Image: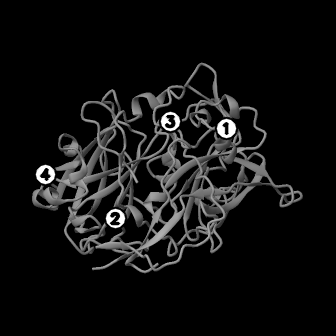
Amino acid sequence: MQQYNHRQPLEPESVFLRESPSQTAGPYVHIGLALNVAGLPEREHEIVNVMARADADGPRMHIRGLVLDGNEVPVDDVLVEAWQADAHGRYVTDFSFDNAFNSLGRAAPGMGVDQAGWWSFTTIKPGRLSHPDGPEMAPHINLMIFARGINIHLHTRLYFDDEGEANAVCPFLNRVPTERRRTLIASRVEDSEDGEPVYEFVIRLQGRDETVFFDF
Amino acid sequence: MAANEHTAFVMRDRNWHPPAYAPGYKTSVARSPRQALMAIQTPSASEITGPDFQSLALGPYDNDLLNNYRESTDRDGLPVGERIQVYGRVIDQFGKPVPHTLVEMWQANAGGRYRHKKDSYAAPLDPNFGGVGRTVTDEGGWYRFRTIKPGPYPWPNDPNSWRPAHIHISVMGPSISTRLITQLYFEGDPLIPFCPIVNTIRDADAIETLTSRLDMARSRSFDCLVYRFDIVTRGALQTFFENF
């Protein structure tokens, strides 16, 4: 359970500024945030799509994903950021390249998948964590989508089709209209060569099956 | 911040940001959601936590674009163009500094060409310039980059669309709720009012906040001009305590 801390006195708020306006990440976001995809020399450490090393605590898995535009064309210049809990349902907020698992990852087409537009993450299945409105949320990964033509990044969530019981009681997922809920659920499609599950997740920016995007 | 302590944030004013669908910027037409965003009124740890980069080990030239491409490729020349420094502060909407946050940037070279395999503009690549930098803000929220001023370039939106000189800026802030990618423009650039991407922002005051200011007082004689660019992330509200 979470609650506001009502004991804290209100601070005077004399200054109130507007947030810096968003601008599209543009077609060359990969030279800035996914250097190897753009063919640039990698620096000593980069934030990439492998969020869990082999010795990370919890069951390892792989996500392969695709973002489609309104014409069902793969968005090949997309950058996807993931933010997820560890196997125990805790976010690892101290990002470090020494961590066996980091809650933050970045993926772009060309990282780990050869087909046009597909991107991938190697990570662990997140644990469940609390929600202020009731029962624990089902395992999920928060995704942020940046690309040319996207003026302000999009937030969505990825859930798992083999977590039916947890999904059914998830207070977050249950607020999404039933007919659109499936746009947030990744399908377990196969096992990788080393026997780890692979989930597939297609994000549609428009159209009949437009993915649910969130404002918070 | 203790592991069980979280902060909520001021609601994002989406009328101040560019709308998803902005037909003057043609690529947005097929890439903008048509359904309303779903509002999350009670944030959980999923929304209000984010990465802290205090432990991130960065290279000594990561924020120095005059030298970082040379360092990674063993070249020995300096990039062509107007040497500049860009500095500023990452603060929240209440004016509080945002320390230890990752600020990343990327840009075209002085001729307006990106070091990207898909950039086919006729301007030459600069053998000594990569165009990528990153840094972590200090205790006071300050950041700084040394680079060359990027050039304007044409792009295929309209038959004669040009981007003003700009630097792409990515900032994380304390939470994924504060995540932001924006662009820095330069004071006095005559191309700003003509740019369809700038004009996805409807409020002239909002465009002004993305225009960096020449800071002559800090400019260095026979070295570089200095531009100031402050970045405002969403304001931190009350603290949540999570009881397990």
Is any part of residue B62 visible from this angle? no
Residue A151 placement (x, y as % from top left): 50, 40
Alpha-carbon distance for marks 3 and 4?
A: 33 Å
Alpha-carbon distance for marks 3 and 1?
A: 32 Å
Between marks 3 and 1 in the image, the one whose residue lies nearer the viewer: 1
Label 2 Cα neighbours within 10 Å, binned few <14 / some 14-19 / many ≥20: many
Disc 1 residue type (three-letter): Ala
Q: Which residue is mark 2?
A: B44
How was this image coloured? one colour
Q: Is residue A158 above or below residue B23?
A: below
Label 3, secondary structure: give it: loop
Residue A138 placement (x, y as % from top left): 20, 61
Q: Which residue is mark 1?
A: B204
Q: Which residue is mark 3?
A: B118
Label 4 Cα neighbours within 10 Å, binned few <14 / some 14-19 / many ≥20: few
- Is residue A49 toward the left or the right of residue B19 in the image? left
- Disc 2: host chain: B
Q: Are marks 2 and 3 in contact (CB under 8 Å)?
A: no
Instruction: Of the two numbered discs 2 and 3 on the same chain, state the one appearing first in sequence.
Output: 2
Disc 2 residue type (three-letter): Ser
Q: Are marks 3 and 1 in contact (CB under 8 Å)?
A: no
Q: Residue furthest right?
A: B221
Label 1, secondary structure: give it: helix
